[in-house]
Image: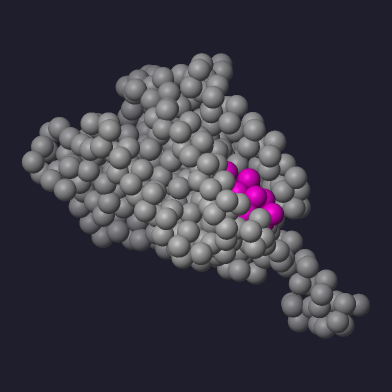
């Protein structure tokens, strides 16, 4: 439902900019639909795969991820002052989007192998900080503070779920907070985002333009919206209306009803994801499901929070809805892994019930 909503909203939000930049109003929706089909295929493939296989592939996946991040820094395409894409032919790939899933798989396998030694400094906290710092450094060189922050949130949550001590968590949160604040202060544009969040009205045509125009678009939509396709903000008022600002366009066209429904879908997906994690038959599946669910929930909160001015804008796309093929394919692939954990759990529980001679969950008698 989120993906279909995203396809409809991307077309509505992008046809103006597509016409202006490429003389083709269908430019963005065609590419998004292609990536949606690819992502759907990846979802089905991952769902049918035994997720335990990912434990053996964790190190190769991480090695490939690091290689792609390095290649992006060396030969990637620079757009808007950021070097985050690998371009081949008419398509572009953003390795940072797949890095999130790769990190989750690697950390789930690594944390699962630590056992009780995870609580020690030498074998638990120190290696964890080294792994996280190496990945964060490669991402910040692009630069990509938004993705780095989301990966920090994912990894700290997984570390806590694996059994870290309160002292370790306190040290992580303190060091992570200092690192994020330091990175924000180093670059002027990051500090500007923070000041804009506090006082966007002081510069309504400059740094505060995107924040204020997003709120204007949401306000224009009211309860039921102006109608599908009737947004005014997409006519170059809401910057990046088809990517980071798509939630504002959705609210303007379909109103509070639609935005509340999208938030409810994300909340439902989050609750079901953590339920899958809780019921997972092993520690690896538990950590894997926890990481994937935290990723989607955190990224949705960061995007919607920025648009609604609950938190500063960070330039993070809204999962399933924002334009971006790499992001959509990576997220659908992650949901496929989550579905694999759920399927394996149900099959195992059904087998256990059959071994005890119990009736199947459907209530029908077995022949």
Front residue (pair 33, 337): 337
Residue furthest toward the front?
122
Coordinates of residue 164 in the picture (x, y in percent): 53, 62
Residue 214 horizontal side relative to residue 336, left or right:
left
Q: Is residue 74 above or below residue 198?
A: above
Residue 277 visible in the snapshot? yes
Q: Position of residue 296 (x, y in %)?
A: 49, 52
Task: Answer whether residue 49 is magenta in the image.
Answer: no
| Residue placed furthest toward the left | 202
Counting from the top left corner in percent of width and height, residue 192 is at 20, 36
Note whether residue 45 is visible. no
Where does the magenta region start and end?
103-113
Query: Which residue shows up at 86% across the image and 82% down it?
Result: 356
Examine the structure image and report whether residue 111 is included in the region drawn in magenta: yes
Residue 34 vs residue 311, the one in the foreground: 311
The residue lying furthest to the right in this view is: 367
What residue is drawn where x is 58% and y is 27%?
68
């Amino acid at each position: 439902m989120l993906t279909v909503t995203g396809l409809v909203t991307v077309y509505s939000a992008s046809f103006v900019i597509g016409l202006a930049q490429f003389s083709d109003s269908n430019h963005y929706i065609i590419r998004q639909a292609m990536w949606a089909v690819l992502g759907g295929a990846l979802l089905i493939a991952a769902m049918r795969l035994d997720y335990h296989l990912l434990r053996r592939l964790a190190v190769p996946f991480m090695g490939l991820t690091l290689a792609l991040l390095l290649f992006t820094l060396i030969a990637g395409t620079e757009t808007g002052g950021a070097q985050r894409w690998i371009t081949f032919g008419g398509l572009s790939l953003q390795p940072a989007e797949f890095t999130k899933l790769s990190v989750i798989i690697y950390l789930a396998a690594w944390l699962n192998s630590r056992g009780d030694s995870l609580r020690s400094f030498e074998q638990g906290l120190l290696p964890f900080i080294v792994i996280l710092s190496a990945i964060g450094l490669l991402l910040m060189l692009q630069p990509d503070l938004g993705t780095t922050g989301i990966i920090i949130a994912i990894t700290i949550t997984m570390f806590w779920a694996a059994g870290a001590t309160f002292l370790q968590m306190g040290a992580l949160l303190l060091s992570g907070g200092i690192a994020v604040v330091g990175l924000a202060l180093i670059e002027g544009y990051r500090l500007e985002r923070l000041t804009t969040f506090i006082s966007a009205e002081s510069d309504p045509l400059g740094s505060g333009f995107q924040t204020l125009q997003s709120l204007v678009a949401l306000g224009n939509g009211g309860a039921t919206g102006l109608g599908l396709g009737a947004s005014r903000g997409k006519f170059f008022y809401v910057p990046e209306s088809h990517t980071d600002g798509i939630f504002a366009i959705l609210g303007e066209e379909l109103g509070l009803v639609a935005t509340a429904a999208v938030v409810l879908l994300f909340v439902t997906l989050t609750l079901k994801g953590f339920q899958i994690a809780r019921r997972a038959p092993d520690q690896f599946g538990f950590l894997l499901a926890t990481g994937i669910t935290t990723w989607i929930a955190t990224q949705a909160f960061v995007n919607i929070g920025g648009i609604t001015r609950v938190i500063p804008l960070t330039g993070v796309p809204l999962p399933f809805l924002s334009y971006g093929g790499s992001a959509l394919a990576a997220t659908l692939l992650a949901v496929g892994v989550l579905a694999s954990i759920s399927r394996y759990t149900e099959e195992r529980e059904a087998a256990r019930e059959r071994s005890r001679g119990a009736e199947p969950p459907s209530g029908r008698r077995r022949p």
